[in-house]
Image (tube, helix red, strand yellow):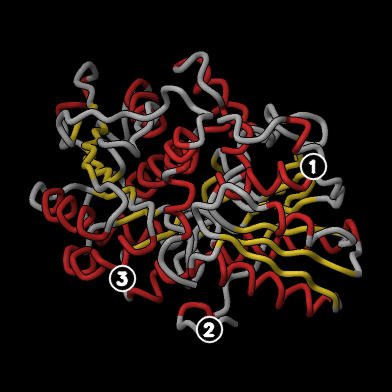
Amino acid sequence: MTTDHHARTAIVACLALAAGALAAGCSSSTSSSSSTTSSTSSPAAASAPIVIAYPSIQTGVYATPAKNNDIELAVKTINAHGGVDGHQLQYVAYDAGITPEQAVTATQQLLGTKPTAIIGYQVDAQVQAVAQLLKQSGIPTLSDAQGPAAGSPAVKVPNLFTIVPSLVNAIQAGTSYGFSKYHPASVGIFHTDDTASTEDAAVAQALLKRDGVKNFTVRSASQTATDVTQQALAMKGTDLVFEYGFPTVEAAFNTALQQNGVTAPIMGDQSGNFLAAYGLNKPSELTGYAYTPYCGAQVLTTPAAKSYLSAYQAAYPGQSVLTTTPYIYDAVYLIAQAVKDDGGNLSASAINRELGSLTYSGACGTYHSDANHDTIHQVVVISYANGTNPGTLVAQDTEPPVASSYFTGSGG
């Protein structure tokens, strides 16, 4: 596993723009690279605030209008209920962009302010680049980078926790669902030719071989490809197709499958939300499509998921639930729970200790850290067979902790 798994979807809104599917979803603003949300309306504000640094994509062509919605909603909601043991919450957003260099600059800036905790870093390579800075600071850090290369064991940062399912767990859940539902004798695998997508495809193929699949058709395309007709034609006769890669290329592949009469069901990756939300594929092209999102709050029926969706839709009417980041919302509550569990203690050591042991039921599922500091192991599978808004929950698995070999590069 390598460095660019989350980058593929972190920039998807603007890739959609390049494909002509999104007219005005990205900002090219050159305004200030940070912003602060806080509340002083409650008596609790008299105590030291819980300050959350949020290194994320804030400006430039990759910044989306909803970039701060989830962290802002969580902070406002907690503050409206009195804060945490006398502490109000604040967040400060830092423009970390998508490159390692931008992340280092943002991290140097935020560490100078001594925040209580950090939520962010969307790209594996960014976590690798700032690892030593984070380790030296000791500040609790909750990251939404998904690859094992960005996990706490790999970068050796004991104060780092991952708040989305590991990519390995997501691939395991996807292949398990596809194999158990369709029992394919032959499988097609399509991926873009970047290193991360190539390795994702290899992991999927290895898992399916263990399940007993012997016949594979594997094809790839450039991460900027627009014509994937030949790759789609190669899938004729397969019983099930898996795809891993950049969303716009996956979208072109899905279109080509339909245009060329390939009717095999498709098992997609985390791009699925964006294929529908940004109109990269027509609903008719996704009727046989299922995928594993970072979080399936839009289809979960738990009280926490329903409460989150209700609050989000009330706060941001008209915005698609397929573009939300509920794991960021949950991360704020994880920090709040850690502070509360130690009686309002804001020290980094106390918060890290509590994050390592607490259990929290959030919008995305149940969080509880394992030895790898992966905090969530529930992976959902969403199908678009009955429509794309918001899709249908067809499977929900709790995956085991990722094997240590994945953190050392040997692949498990």
Q: Give the amino acid at mark 3.
A: Val
* Residue 356 at least partly seen: yes
* Residue 294 at least partly seen: no
Q: Tell me which numbered mark, 3 or 2, is placed earlier along the sequence.
A: 3
The image shows residue 250 at horizontal and vertical percentages of 62, 49
Instruction: Report which quarter residue 180 is drawn in.
Output: bottom right
Q: Secondary structure at mark 1?
A: helix
Q: Is residue 381 left or right of residue 265?
A: left
Q: Secondary structure at mark 3?
A: loop
Residue plotted at (27% across, 47% down): 97
The image shows residue 146 at horizontal and vertical percentages of 48, 59
Q: Secondary structure at mark 2?
A: helix
The image shows residue 159 at horizontal and vertical percentages of 31, 64
Residue plotted at (34% across, 63% down): 160
Q: Tell me which numbered mark, 2 or 1, is placed earlier along the sequence.
A: 1
Spatial CA distance of label 3 from label 2 is 17 Å
Dot 3 and dot 1 residues touching (CB under 8 Å): no
Residue plotted at (61% across, 47% down): 293
Label placed on residue 405: 2
Q: Give the amino acid at mark 2.
A: Ser
Question: Which quadrant of the figure contains the C terminus?
Answer: bottom right
| Nearer mark to the viewer, of 3 and 2 | 2
| Nearer mark to the viewer, of 2 and 1 | 1
Spatial CA distance of label 3 from label 1 is 46 Å
In this rendering, is residue 161 above or below 366?
below
| Nearer mark to the viewer, of 3 and 1 | 1
395 vs 389, nearest the viewer = 389
15 vs 174, nearest the viewer = 15
Q: Which residue is mark 3?
A: 157
The image shows residue 248 at horizontal and vertical percentages of 55, 44
Q: Which residue is mark 1?
A: 258
Q: Is residue 38 left or right of residue 275?
A: left
